[in-house]
Image (cartoon, grey):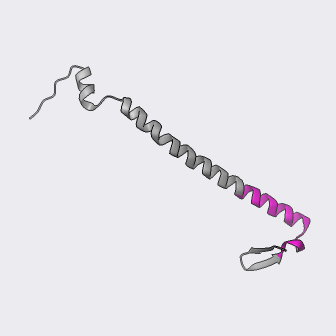
Amino acid sequence: MSTLKIDDSADNLGNLSGEAKSILNMFKLTEQESLRRQLQLTIARTARNPHGQAIRAQLPTPLEAVQAHGEAIKVS
């Protein structure tokens, strides 16, 4: 059988009470959900980068912005 070790205490999973097994299952589920959400966040951040680059490519350069507004560039 499997052994559960928490801190310095270890016990056979078969020896756990029904309540302890239920708590352990909920702990496992919350850990899995946390990992799933971390993965989703990593995917979203990775997908965001190309979108940022694409919008940046659509923005005018500083020179184009000045030319579009008819402002003169002074060189000292």
Q: Is residue 37 left or right of residue 5?
A: left
In the image as oriented, which residue stretches furthest toward the left?
76
Q: Residue at x 56, y 43 (%)?
A: 44
- The total of numbered circles placed on residues is 0
Which quadrant: the N terminus? bottom right
Asked if the stretch drawn in magenta spans residue 19, the answer is yes
Q: Which residues are magenta?
A: 12-31
> In terms of secondary structure, what is the magenta stretch mainly?
helix
Asked if the stretch drawn in magenta spans residue 28, the answer is yes
Q: Residue at x 46, y 39 (%)?
A: 50
Spot occupied by residue 26 in the image (x, y as percentages of width and height): 79, 58
In the image as oriented, which residue stretches furthest toward the right?
18
Q: Residue at x 90, y 69 (%)?
A: 17
Q: Is residue 34 left or right of residue 68?
A: right
Spot occupied by residue 21 in the image (x, y as percentages of width and height): 85, 65
Which quadrant: the C terminus? top left
Q: Residue at x 61, y 51 (%)?
A: 39
Spot occupied by residue 29 in the image (x, y as percentages of width and height): 76, 56
